[in-house]
Amino acid sequence: MKLHLPIRALAAASLLLGLGVAATTTAAGAAPFQRPGHALFVETDNVSGNSVLSYLRGPDGTISYVGSFPTGGLGAVAANAVADPLASQGGLALIDGGRELVATNAGSNTITVFDVFGARLREREQISSGGVFPNSVSSHGDLVAVLNAGGTGTVAEFRVFGDQLVALPNQVRSLGLNNTTPPDFVHGAGQVGYTPDGQHLVVTTKHSTDSYEVFSVAQNGSLGASPVVTAADNAVPFAFNFDAAGNLVGVEASTSSLSVYSVNANGTLTSLGSVSDGAKALCWLSSANGYFFGDNAGSASVSSFTENGSGAPTLVNAAAATAHAGTTDSTVSPDGTTLYVESGAAGTIDVYRVGAAGSLTQVETVFNIPTASEGIAAS
């Protein structure tokens, strides 16, 4: 598939040539950038050949196209999905202190590991995901978990050994979902994530069971034989983050609600409260500076939330920002100053500056992102 540079990047390249500046080109034909550690990565999920698009992040949060880096695998589309082919959060993830990037190849049942050099990538290996339709990745220390949403669903665990990612023996666990292959976008599992203390691994099952499944994680990294299952406050739990206290903050699409749960030592969850933004299909979640930003796929908007002194969620602004059609995945820069929101239907990335009290100010919109892309990460 031929990928097109964003309009702004094309203009910049033309300006360099007009000034007589020689630009060394990458394999993708774009000018390289050497500044380390400030990049944005987007996964295309193309069924004919998956790739990761790379952008340099400027001091003001704006992004400049660097190149396209093939994963060597295939993308795929969840059944009945429109703008969100993976129907998940975490389809693209930085691990090992940002030195490596893991991309999910849902059509190949593999993951690709890249070495990260600033905004440049070098493919290192492509390995089995341990299941069908991988769509989410999480890490804690040298442990890496991959969620496979197809069929009954599985979680597979890996460990970083030197310059390799190695599957841990006997560490694939079934989720027991009532689902298909490829998964239906509202019934497949939505995200996998380690708790901040690394003692539990959480999976959202969306409408298959409307639950959070929590596996124990032993000191040697082994997972409990079966998960502890807690029903969500509202149907279709999709994505989650964690707050400063280690509580799970999840978004539940059926009522466009954000719910907060304490994670107990035995893997059960205790609800601390739930609040709706009144929008449509709140599915993705990012956080910065004590505020949470939820993407409403059906409303093309971003809502902002925070927590009160008891840890219960409160709605700050139901329309903190206007995005584009099919608002999907998002991520926040590591310093918490910039929010990047992907819109799979429109093929855009909206960039917002995060201000006081969780305010969002739009900085730019980058067009010509392949439609139905999903998976985003910032270094």
Image (cartoon, rainbow, N blue to C red):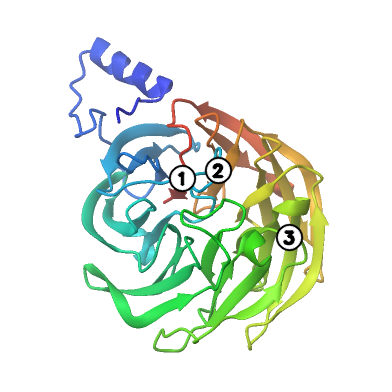
Q: Which residue is depicted at the point 47% across and 32% down?
A: 371
Q: Is residue 102 left or right of residue 223?
A: left
- The residue at the point 77 percent across, 69 percent down is 311
In whole angstroms, how far apart are the C-alphas of marks 3 and 1?
Answer: 22 Å
Toward the viewer: 315 or 134?
134
Q: Which quadrant of the structure image shows residue 346?
A: top right
Q: Which label sits on residue 208?
A: none
Which comes sooner in the sequence, label 3 or label 1?
1
What crowding class fits label 1: few (fewer than 14 Cα within 10 Å), some (14-19), or many (20 or more)? many
- Label 3 sits on a secondary structure element that is loop
Of 303 and 151, which appears nearest the observer?
Answer: 151
Amino acid type at mark 3: Ala
Q: Is residue 56 above or below residue 13?
A: below
Give amino acid for label 1: Val
**Relative horizontal placement of residue 225, taking residue 252 as reference (left or right):** left
Residue topped by disc 2: 81
Q: Are marks 3 and 1 in contact (CB under 8 Å)?
A: no
Label disc, if present, on residue 77 of the rendered structure: 1
On residue 235, which mark appears?
Answer: 3
